[in-house]
Image (spheres, rainbow, N blue to C red):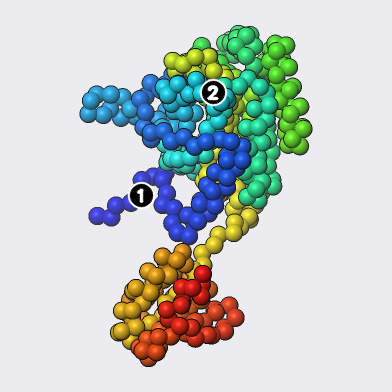
């Protein structure tokens, strides 16, 4: 019986993996410039981390998590997102005591959510994200956003839209929550079962409902912007001021609601406006989450971050027809003629590789013409041809595949010729 790949997952085949390498390398270089350091957390954590950290009223916790019980009877979950685990590690390892604050971290790795697979959205997907913990300065909000925008732009994306909102501080959110409950409660029976549960748990999440997005009460729902107190409003205005200084265009959308419970103050999304990209346009999302560290047992620690899907990044590149400079050529392909020459190329191949030269040889006993075709498919810059006669003379024929020029060089100096 044939065994197939699980639904909602993918094999990333060569040479597409090279595209992933380029994106990952660009992300790491940017993080180095911005002084973010890599952190690696476990792929599975205690379920409570996500129910407390992400929020038990979210779709992720209610419907999408891959949960299992281990042999010790402990409830475990494959991580559905990165922030909760990073903040857990920040608290557990007492990084709040580091002399250098804020603590600036980045992560990259697989996440897992049981949701309906569609273009650019998988049940196992790879996220790149950053977290800055320990600063209440609106300038760090602008920095986090600017890093995300810089990564997309550096790799060639142009049709981007940055959308901002403020969810306010605790006082602002409480006032807005009461207004939302009063607004929806008289007709909550007209909404889906999920929204009816959210009314008391977290009415802000009603605004993020896809099923009831067309309901007339959605359009007239109270806006958080109208309930921001003076300090929240001033904070949001400062974030906008800094983004203008950084020459990053944005739109303010009072209806933007991030899907996780821990967000407050700044919330943002970066969307693709490329034609044919698809109905789900969000590439990246993030925001401020003051209070999450305390929820996970740590001291009061402000934080902000974002996460983006590498899969959706690649989908956006394809939609804009951006071709990354993937290098697939090798330096030298060894062609052998005769048994003695064939045996000799085993050691010669290793000698080239020891000198940092990418090289390959034939392993199928193919004829001369077939070996040259293999070299061409691999994009070899040079082909070195060694026969038994050349081996006897201590020479090898080197052909430049771009110019067609051929030279005879000493066999002992082949590696030096390349170096």
Q: Residue at the location (52% across, 32% down)?
A: 105
Query: Which numbered dot is residue 99?
Result: 2
Which residue has dot 1 on it? 5
**Spot occupied by residue 414 in the image (x, y as percentages of width and height):** 46, 77
Q: Is residue 64 left or right of residue 242?
A: left
Label 1 crowding class (10 Å Cα cut-off): few <14, some 14-19, many 20+?
A: few
Q: Residue at the location (56% across, 35% down)?
A: 36
Q: Nearer the viewer, residue 26 or 256?
A: 26
Q: Is residue 362 left or right of residue 189?
A: left
Callout 2: helix, strand or loop?
loop
**Spot occupied by residue 387 in the image (x, y as percentages of width and height):** 38, 87
* Foreground tag (2 vs 1): 2
Residue 15 seen by the camera: yes
- The outermost residue toward the left is 71
> From the viewer's perspective, is residue 334 above or below residue 211?
below
Give residue 35's quadrant in the image: top right
Q: Residue at the location (68% across, 15% down)?
A: 232
Q: Residue at the location (44% across, 53% down)?
A: 12
Residue 303 seen by the camera: no
Give the CA separation, mark 2 to mark 1: 47 Å
Give residue 385's quadrant in the image: bottom left
**Spot occupied by residue 11 in the image (x, y as percentages of width and height):** 41, 52
Callout 1: helix, strand or loop?
loop
> From the viewer's perspective, is residue 126 above or below residue 327?
above
* Sequence-earlier tag: 2 or 1: 1
């Amino acid at each position: 019986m044939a065994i197939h790949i699980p639904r909602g997952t993918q094999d990333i085949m060569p040479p597409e993996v090279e595209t992933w390498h380029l994106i990952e390398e660009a992300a790491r270089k940017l993080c180095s410039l911005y002084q973010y350091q890599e952190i690696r957390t476990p792929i599975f954590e205690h379920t409570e981390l996500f129910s407390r950290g992400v929020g038990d009223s979210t779709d992720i916790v209610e419907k999408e998590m891959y949960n299992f019980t281990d042999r010790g009877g402990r409830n475990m979950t494959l991580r559905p997102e990165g922030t909760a685990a990073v903040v857990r590690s920040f608290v557990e390892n007492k990084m709040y005591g580091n002399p250098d604050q804020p603590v600036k971290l980045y992560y990259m790795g697989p996440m897992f959510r049981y949701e309906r697979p569609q273009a650019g959205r998988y049940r196992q997907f790879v996220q790149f994200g950053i977290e800055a913990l320990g600063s209440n300065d609106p300038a760090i909000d602008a920095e986090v956003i600017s890093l995300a925008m810089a990564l997309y732009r550096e790799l060639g994306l142009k049709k981007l839209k940055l959308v901002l909102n403020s969810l306010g501080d605790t006082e602002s959110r409480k006032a807005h929550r009461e207004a939302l409950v009063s607004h929806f409660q008289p007709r909550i029976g007209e909404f889906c079962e999920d929204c009816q549960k959210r009314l008391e748990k977290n009415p802000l999440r009603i605004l993020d409902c896809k099923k009831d997005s067309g309901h007339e009460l959605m359009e007239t729902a109270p806006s958080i912007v109208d309930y921001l107190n003076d300090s929240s409003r001033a904070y949001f205005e400062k974030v906008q001021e800094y983004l203008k200084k950084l020459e990053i265009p944005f739109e303010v959308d009072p209806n933007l609601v991030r899907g996780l419970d821990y967000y407050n103050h700044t919330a943002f999304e970066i969307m693709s406006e490329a034609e044919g990209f698809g109905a789900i346009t969000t590439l990246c999302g993030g925001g401020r989450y003051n209070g999450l560290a305390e929820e996970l047992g740590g001291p009061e620690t402000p934080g902000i971050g974002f996460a983006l899907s590498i899969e959706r990044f690649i989908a956006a590149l394809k939609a804009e027809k951006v071709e990354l400079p993937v290098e697939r050529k090798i330096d030298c392909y060894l062609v052998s003629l005769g048994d003695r020459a064939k045996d000799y190329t085993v050691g010669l191949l290793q000698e080239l590789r020891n000198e940092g030269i990418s090289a390959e040889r034939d392993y199928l006993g193919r004829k001369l013409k077939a070996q040259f075709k293999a070299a061409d498919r691999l994009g070899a810059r040079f082909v070195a041809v060694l026969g038994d006669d050349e081996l006897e003379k201590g020479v090898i024929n080197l052909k430049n595949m771009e110019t067609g020029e051929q030279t005879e060089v000493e066999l002992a100096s082949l590696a030096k010729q390349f170096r």
